[in-house]
Image (cartoon, grey):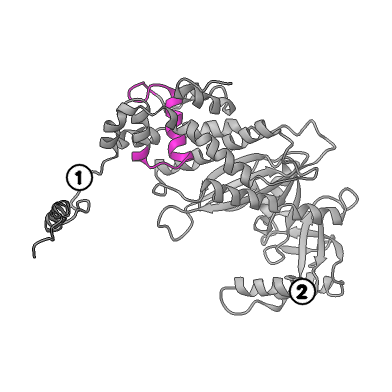
Amino acid sequence: MQLPPADPETLFEELLQDLPPETGSMAREFKAFARARKIKTQEQLLRVVLLYCGVDKALREVAGILTALYEPITDQSVAERLRACGPWVKAVLRKMLPPPAVTALPQALRFVVIDATTVQAPGATGTDYRLHISLDLVALEFLEVSISDVHTGETLKNFTLGRGDVAITDRGYCHPAGMRAALNKGAQLMVRLNPFSVILCDPVGQPLELGAALKRQHADTIRTLEVVIYSASRADEVRGWVHAYRLSAEQANRARQQCRQRHKTGTPKAATLFLAGWVLVFTTLAPEVVSAQTIMALYRCRWQVELAIKRWKSVLAMDALRAKAQSPLAEVWLHGKLLYALLLERRMRRQLGDTWGHLDHERLATWWRVWGMLKEEIAPMITGALFWKEEAWEACLKVLAERPRRRKLQQLPSEAINVLYRWDESKQEGMPIAA
């Protein structure tokens, strides 16, 4: 029988094997770890980051755990150390996701699903940050993750793409400038078309009335149109094909109802309601290279990035920012949470096999429950709960205690305490309480 580790560091180091080997030296390089005081090593500092960002412990709880493991430390000291960790954690995160080389695959295509989601600070009424994600559609492996402020929109300019990559995105990325930038890098496109955000023309540059071109198309069929897309200023031009799949009457009615619900004021235009009955996908891949049916089937698989975002939010609480927006702690928490998510994913692939969740074969299960179980498995590695020192509890209570404040913690009134004790004494003597 395998014996348990003798100390918390051994158990914690087993979790850290999926980090880049230079993580510790980078802590000094980025001045996150300058000198050993209450926190003696870079590994202990990384434990602080994962306690705060990964398992979502409050600052005072982090201080209590460190006190139980090592020596007394205050939550103010923990916050001070965390504030210095932002550049370090961001750099380690980049090392976890090096851009894979695709130049060695001149004839192969790598399908890259791209999307973004928003993150709000506590009490916010709008968006504070935007999380940008790119995902390998076959391996379901994260290729890029980054955090930006709310002013950085959804555009293909945010991602590293190259020759052999096919970017698959929703209509939020249907902007000619971003699409042109991706094409200039050698990538191909598969984008849900938003016909109202671009100028649509035929191959010779004449305006194309999409509604009229699709009017006679039958339900459950696909029609392909060769088009040119321009920006409003005509500064950016993208050539390709639009594959238009007409929904069934039932599906079209449901889509139009959703369109009406999304429309904030008034009634949508007739052209908007008409085109809501189609799935329109623009691609730069010629039909003889990838057929229209395959394009539409691949685009449906784009839902995998939505599921990944939902998994991050549901299982890891990625959208529950624990710090004030635009603060150093917010930066550390956001990037530390991404680092924690990648550690969990790497551990899953190592334990279950790298091809376990690939989409190129029949799958028997999704990652939801696996992520939930692995989260429970690594939590004791981070908290070190098996090694908390019994004699440290008195110091822990001091660290966890409330700070002095005007409003005291609730306490029974003295009159009630007197009655309580009198009742207890009379119960022992078998006598009623005097009136």
- Helix, strand or loop status at disc 1: loop
Query: What segment carries the magenta color?
Result: 34-61
Q: Amino acid at mark 1?
A: Pro
On screen, 42 above or below 145?
above
Q: Is residue 124 or residue 425 the one in the foreground?
A: 425
The residue that disc 1 covers is: 404
- Residue, far right: 288
Of the numbered discs in the image, which one, if any, rests on residue 364? none
Residue 277: quarter of image: bottom right
Q: Residue at position x 46%, y 23% from top?
A: 9
Tell me the residue that label 2 is attached to: 250
Residue 218: image location, x then y, percent? 87, 72
Q: Is residue 73 left or right of residue 197?
A: left
Q: Quadrant location of residue 14?
A: top right
Residue 291 drawn at (x, y percent): 88, 53
Q: Which quadrant: the N terminus?
A: top right
**On the rendered structure, is 331 left or right of 209?**
left
Crowding near the residue tagged with mark 2, few <14, some 14–19, many ≥20 C-alpha atoms within 10 Å? few
| x, y percent for residue 388 | 38, 29
Residue 332 seen from this side? no
